[in-house]
Amino acid sequence: MMPSLTLAARIERWPIAGGFTISRGAKTEAVVIVAEVSRQGPNGKAIVGRGECVPYARYGETPEGTLEAILAMQGALDGGLDRLGLQGEMRAGAARNALDCALWDLEAKEAEKRIWELLGLSAPRPLTTAYTISLGTPETMAEATAKASRRPLLKIKLGGDGDEARIAAVRKAAPDAELIVDANEAWTDGNLERHLAACAAAGVTMIEQPLPAGQDQALARIKRPVSVCADESVHDRASLEGLRERYDAINIKLDKTGGLTEALVMAESAKALEFDLMVGCMVATSLAMAPALTIAQGARVVDLDGPLLLARDRDDGLRYDGSTVYPPGAELWG
């Protein structure tokens, strides 16, 4: 019989470089939860698996509540709960993500294999990630864009009124970059077509979640001149049904799916429905990005720039060379 698992978790705060603003507000730090599961190895030393999540107020999550939900699973783990059983014991969300990814990390370390070997996949390759430009005035966004204009893929945060001027200013500041847009549910039926046209004129290739989740029926009634990607409207595979008429792509975030286990299945389900895939993130450290890179290998758009937005990252963090992100080392995760 294998030794039982020990569970620990903690709240960490990581300063953001210069702040981060979207349509729902601004923040100056990333508040993350780190879960650790450990088991005594054959040599008597503890083997530790780690996972990181970001509680998101948009979904009713708090750091304290997420921490409590993770720690409450110690009894279930004592009773032999494994990663697959976890899917039925916790709802999809940030808490399950941290614990699921920690169990994956432990599994890889105990098997002395990398995550892709456990999954029977090819070794991951470096990928190009989007780089986020925060919401602001057209002038401040153009200034920030100009500094990042050599990056090949920029993600532009928009917020409703004034978005036509914002996207025009951004395009002028970065004439050669591919642009994707994230409206974070800030548009309305009244301005939807006008904003879509402005994005099309600026050569935007994808727009994330223009309308509020549950109020996005207009997307099925209009001609979409730019690919539209569901974010807040999609969480796990159960939420895919009915989205095909409204969206061309879906954004998979592990904090929404509740971890890598569900994300892997969701990605296959989405592909079967002929959705393009985007793999995104919250603002967090490399520990949160590393599991998502497994899914990102098959994505049309990769948006894993969380560590680039921080004042500092973990010592064993991912390697970023400009907008190229490299697979994690074993000391980080997986």
Image (cartoon, rainbow, N blue to C red):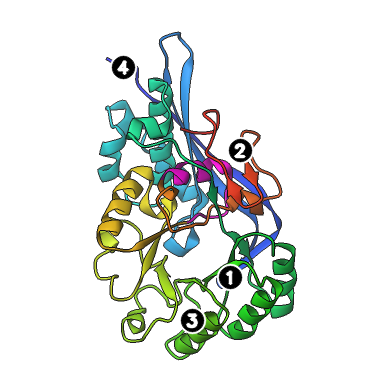
Amino acid, disc 3 = Trp
Which is more N-terminal, label 3 or label 2?
Answer: 3
User: What residue lies at 37% left-to-right and 49% top-to-bottom?
Assistant: 258
Question: Relative to 9, is 262 on the left or the right?
Answer: left
Q: Where does label 3 land, which residue?
A: 187
Q: Which residue is most to the front?
A: 176
Amino acid, disc 2 = Gly
Does residue 84 appear in this view? Answer: yes
Query: Dot 4: what SS?
Result: loop
User: What residue lies at 33% left-to-right and 76% top-to-bottom?
Assistant: 246
Q: Range of the magenta residues?
A: 280-294
* Mark 2, other Cα within 10 Å: few <14 / some 14–19 / many ≥20: many
Q: Where does label 1 land, which residue?
A: 157
Which is more N-terminal, label 2 or label 4?
Answer: 4
Q: Where does label 2 land, which residue?
A: 317
Dominant secondary structure (helix, strand or loop) of the stretch shown in magenta:
helix
Mark pair 3, 1: CA separation: 12 Å
Is residue 305 or residue 50 the one in the foreground?
A: 305
